[in-house]
Amino acid sequence: MAASAAADEQVRVRVLDAAEGLFYARGVRAVGMDAVRGAADVSLKRLYQLFPAKERLVEEFLRRRDQSWRAALTRYADARPTPRARLLAVFDWLAEWFAEPGFRGCAFINCYAELGGTSPAVADLARTHKQAVREYLGELTAALDVAAPEALAGQLALLVEGAITTAALTASATPAHEARTAAAALLDAAGARAPEAGGSGGGAGAEG
């Protein structure tokens, strides 16, 4: 039984890996279950045993994407030494993501654009993801000595979303750098200035 469960999980992971690559690169509507079957190298019968409907596969793809995306972001940002540095590192991480060859914008916005009007589950998953990102920024701003950390988190969330959308349209990492500059200005205005104005410079981990 244990061996069978492990084998099932391996097939499930393979299907999800294939679906994520195809859905993100081509869009959900453009990818049929047969394409997923071929990319995952499983039978169509086995695929439908695991995911009886395409929407179920899309939902699981989004749940897994949410977990992996936010885990990568928090790992990167939380490694920085100060609350301000962690917030600015969010934009450094975005710049690295935007520069990846397969970058195609936000998977949640893409899926919402395709299915949000007809699939309440997809719409809810997209909103839940965006709210989770907003809450993470709220945790970071709460660690700052500022008067209105929640309002600041909302402003930074808009910079994140704007950078992602603009980068998808322009195929450039520049929006992340521009958003980082704007974020630093917001932090300065809120009173969360860098501890040393004349420190050494740039790089992904530097405060600015």
Image: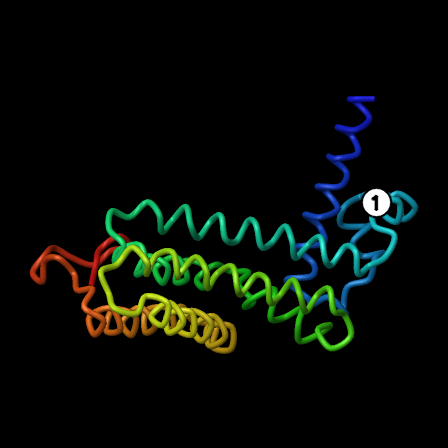
Extreme right residue here? 45
- Under mark 1, the amino acid is Leu
Q: Based on the displayed image, in which of its 4 quarters is residue 94 positioned?
A: bottom left
Quadrant in the rendering for residue 105: bottom right
Disc 1 residue crowd, few under 14, some 14–19, many 20+, Cα 10 Å: some
Coordinates of residue 177 in the picture (x, y in percent): 32, 69
Q: Which residue is mark 1?
A: 50
Residue 116, image x, y percentages: 70, 73
- Front one among 137 and 180: 137
Compared to residue 207, the image places residue 9 above or below, namely above
The residue that appears at 51% across and 77% down in the rendered structure is 169
**Is 190 or 171 nearer to us in this picture?**
190
Q: Note whether 150 is above or below 12 in the view shown.
A: below
The location of residue 197, given as percent across then percent down, is 9, 62
Is 111 placed left or right of 183 in the picture?
right
Q: Is residue 192 left or right of residue 158?
A: left
**In the structure shown, which secondary structural element does the residue marked by tag 1 occupy?**
helix
Q: Residue furthest left?
A: 198
When the figure is inspected, residue 152 is found, relative to residue 4, above or below; the finding is: below
Q: Residue at x 92, y 46 (%)?
A: 45
Write the residue at 24% across / 55% down.
203
